[in-house]
Image (cartoon, rainbow, N blue to C red):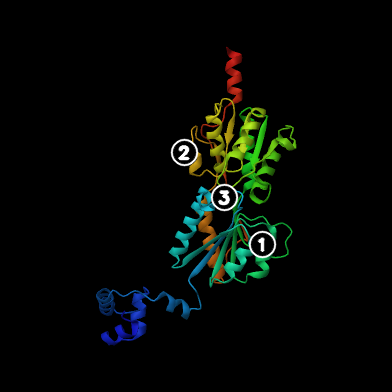
Amino acid sequence: MITIKKMAELLGTSTTTVSNVIHGKEGEVSPVMVEKVKKLIEEYDYVPNRNARNLASNRSGIIGLAMKASENKYDNFVKDPFAGELIGAVERYVRAKGYFTMLYVSSDIGEIISSVSSWNVDGLILLGMQKEDGELLNQKMKKPMVFVDAYFEDVSFDYVNVGIDDRKGGREITEYLIQSGHQKIAFLADNCMGVDYQRFMGYRDALTSAGLPWNEDNFIRLRPSGADMSLILSQAYDRARDFTAFICASDYYAAFILNDLKDRGMKIPEELSIVGFDDNVCSRLVRPALTTVHQDVTEKSRITVEKLFHIINDEDYGANFEQLPVFIVERSSVRKMQDVLYLTDEY
């Protein structure tokens, strides 16, 4: 393959001139020479040596994306629409910067740190991390890092995080159900940490503000078992008659539960209203389509990548904590209880 030096020799010019044309700095080169260099590039099908360029700038040209996912919940975390959208968006924005993305998924933070430490990356994006994970990463990793959806309380180190207002989302979707006439509302999630905890606390806030009673039985702790959803679906079915509405901590669970309950003969939303969180493809594929809390995962990914590159380049990256807005998307999975009561009274 022809080199910049060889092209310069053939054209009787300097390597700097050829390099300027290759890297788009044509304003520093005469139009005649620009055309000559471009013709030579096309003739020899020249491809820039990215490794050499990165070596010269002391950069690897690689961004690491590490995700911690519960082995009990997923046999393949990337199948989750939220994870898939985030990975795809991060890769696209990283590629637009002229970089490559390396992905690592594990349920073991020690394994993640050990593997990622061996990568020659310029920065890291981290998803699914709890407080203790963040503390270990801060101790072991000396690379620029940006977390996604992290809630680290009472830690002694500074960290950068991009997320959404999960608590507000949980509160607003609960208020929506209450305004629709529901009082017996359950919250379903497979944990009560981080993101799901914030969504749960928003649910509690709304119940308290409305003067509605709450007890621990209103939180249905789902027990995932990899790809086998049967236990989760049975848990939901066993409690479905105790409530008029389910709030699921994700569209992923809401869609599975909605379909299963319909298969078992329940009418949705006439007998049970179901809402989700995320507004991903699951919410639009099921019937009735899910009312849910919208978050812009692609925009979250874009901001995450931008912040990381600002840190890498020692530039101002703005606030340490970026919180994107959420809003309710109303579809067909919620019964308006007061409308039904009104029509009955009228009759």
Residue 249 left/right relative to 95: right
Give x and y (percent) for residue 147. 60, 60
The residue drawn where x is 57% and y is 64% is 317
In the displayed structure, 24 sits above or below 152; it is below
Residue 121 left/right relative to 44: right
Q: Amino acid at mark 2?
A: Leu
In the displayed structure, 204 sits above or below 339; it is below
Q: Residue furthest top?
A: 347
Specify the label residue 347 is tagged with: none
Q: Secondary structure at mark 1?
A: helix
Dot 3 alpha-carbon crowd within 10 angstroms: few under 14, some 14 to 19, many 20 or more: some
Which of the two discs, 3 and 1, sits closer to the camera? 3
Q: Are marks 1 and 2 in contact (CB under 8 Å)?
A: no
Give x and y (percent) for residue 167. 65, 46
Towards the viewer: 264 or 282: 264
The residue drawn where x is 28% and y is 76% is 41
Q: Secondary structure at mark 2?
A: helix
Residue 271 sits in quarter = top right
Q: Which residue is mark 1?
A: 134
Q: Amino acid at mark 3?
A: Tyr
Q: Secondary structure at mark 3?
A: loop
Q: Which residue is mark 3?
A: 74
Specify the label residue 285 is tagged with: 2
Towards the viewer: 271 or 74: 74
Towards the viewer: 16 or 70: 70
Q: Amino acid at mark 1?
A: Gly
Q: Are marks 3 and 2 in contact (CB under 8 Å)?
A: no
In the displayed structure, 92 sits above or below 197; it is below
Dot 2 alpha-carbon crowd within 10 angstroms: few under 14, some 14 to 19, many 20 or more: few
Give x and y (percent) for residue 64. 53, 65
